Image (spheres, rainbow, N blue to C red):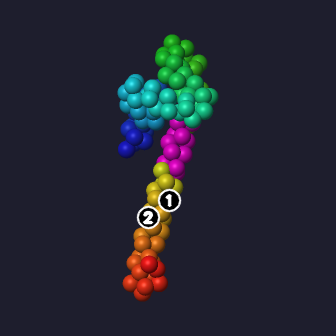
Amino acid sequence: MLFEAVDNTKEVQSKISLLLSGLLGSSTSETNKAVGKWNNANLEDDIIQLRNIPRFIDQSCYVPAIAGPLLNNFQTELRQRFKQQSRKFKYADLYSRLLTEWLGSVRIIIQIAQQQRVLP
């Protein structure tokens, strides 16, 4: 849904703003909280880069040279971060389903063993 909105936007600056707000959160306070959590995870270089993107977007309105390859690189990088996050969520979902299935099967085995008086 976010990618559809980004694809329907014509200006690169708006596309980057949408991607960045989707990645970090929609409001400034949410962005600061997300950046604060990342800071605790020792990702300071990423934090600095993500914090500087809005500055480059603002500057690109005044300096047309910035509007070219740099903004396109930002857009590509932000899309890659979304894909990476998506893969992480998929793996976490898979892990949770496998763990739930495994725990469920362990409970069934324990119940069967108790019924057959193998376990106390």
From this view, report whether residue 115 is shown above or below residue 64: below
Q: Main secondary structure of the magenta part?
A: helix
Q: Residue at x 41, y 33 (%)?
A: 25
Residue 13 location (% of width, % of height): 47, 26
- Dot 2 and dot 1 residues touching (CB under 8 Å): no
Of residues 64 and 111, the one drawn nearer to the viewer in this rendering:
111
Q: Residues within 10 Å of mark 2 (few under 14, many from 20)?
A: few
Q: Residue at x 37, y 44 (%)?
A: 1
Element class at badge 1 = helix
Q: Residue 105 lies in what quarter of the image?
A: bottom left
Q: Spatial distance from mark 2 to mark 1, Cα to Cα?
A: 8 Å
Name, please, the residue furthest toward the front. 120
Residue 3 location (% of width, % of height): 43, 42
Residue 109 location (% of width, % of height): 45, 78
Residue 103 visible in the picture? yes
Of residues 103 and 43, the one drawn nearer to the viewer in this rendering:
103
Residue at mark 1: 95
Element class at badge 2 = helix
Image quarter of the C terminus: bottom left
Of residues 67 and 105, the one drawn nearer to the viewer in this rendering:
105
The kind of residue on which mark 2 rests is: Thr
Q: Specify the segment rendered in magenta.
A: 77-88
Of residues 97 and 12, the one drawn nearer to the viewer in this rendering:
97
Residue at mark 2: 100
